Amino acid sequence: MSYANATISPAERIKAAGTVVGVHALLGAGLVAGLAVTTYIVDPPIEDNPTVFHIPDVPPPPPEPVPTDAVVPVTPPAAPVPPLDIPTNNPVQVAEPDFTLPPITTRVPVDPPIRGPIAVEPPPPPAPSYTPAPPVPRNNMGSWITTNDYSGRDLRRGNEGTARYRLVIGSDGRVDACDITSSTGHSSLDRSTCRLITQRARFNPATNNQGEQVVGTYTGTVTWQIPE
């Protein structure tokens, strides 16, 4: 081969040298490109190479917001404690009284004067008691109503019957009121019964347990019958 190199012309040597330089330039460019490919692991990923992963940059977390309405406890400053002023026990000065108390005298009790016997009046004797009594007719009861007291109307109609009455006798013995408690069945005979008894009947008034004349009551009956 040294023989072949001896026969090469200078122009060819220059061409061969340029070729060598170009090859080294290509090798250097390839090396630089290889270094550039290795930097893509951190920067943009190479899509043609599935084994290369992109690790993105993770930003730090933002600080937590402080709420505007949060109440921050504030400890007030402690009030200064004044020093205690402890008084000393000073003796109390007692002033002497400027007056003199009167002397105490002992009072001897005196017995009340002796009086003579007091005359006590005896109680009055009890009032005599009486048995209460009802009013009693004073005049003849047969004279209160007779057959002559029949009215012509009752005679013509043949009205007959028995009337039961109740009288209120005043303290003067006279009839104050008359009520028919059982009717004869004829109002004309009932009215005549009370009217005639009130006019004609007289009584000894009723008395109470002290013998006093009081108002009382009296009951009786009258039979109206037409004589034959």
Image (spheres, helix red, strand yellow):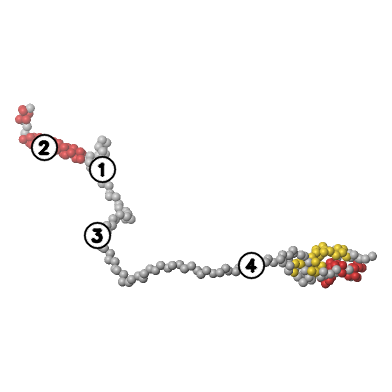
Q: Nearer the viewer, mark 4 or mark 2?
A: 4
Q: Nearer the viewer, mark 3 or mark 2?
A: 3
For the residue pair 6 and 120, the one nearer the viewer reads as 120
Residue carrying label 1: 56
Q: Are marks 3 and 2 in contact (CB under 8 Å)?
A: no
Residue at 36 percent across and 71 percent down: it is 102
The Cα atoms of the two marked residues, 3 and 4, are separated by: 90 Å
Q: Is residue 188 visible?
A: no
Residue at 14 percent across and 38 percent down: it is 28
The Cα atoms of the two marked residues, 4 and 2, are separated by: 178 Å
Q: Nearer the viewer, mark 1 or mark 4?
A: 4
The Cα atoms of the two marked residues, 3 and 1, are separated by: 69 Å
Q: Quadrant of residue 213?
A: bottom right
The Cα atoms of the two marked residues, 2 and 1, are separated by: 41 Å
Dot 1 falls on a residue whose secondary structure is loop
Q: Residue 90 appears at what percent x and percent y?
A: 25, 62
Residue carrying label 2: 21
Q: Are marks 2 and 1 in contact (CB under 8 Å)?
A: no
The Cα atoms of the two marked residues, 3 and 2, are separated by: 101 Å
Q: Residue 8 appears at what percent x and percent y?
A: 6, 32
Q: Quadrant of residue 86?
A: bottom left
Q: Amino acid at mark 1?
A: Pro
Q: Amino acid at mark 4?
A: Pro
Residue 83's disc number = 3
Q: Is residue 64 visible?
A: yes
Residue carrying label 4: 122
Q: Amino acid at mark 3?
A: Pro
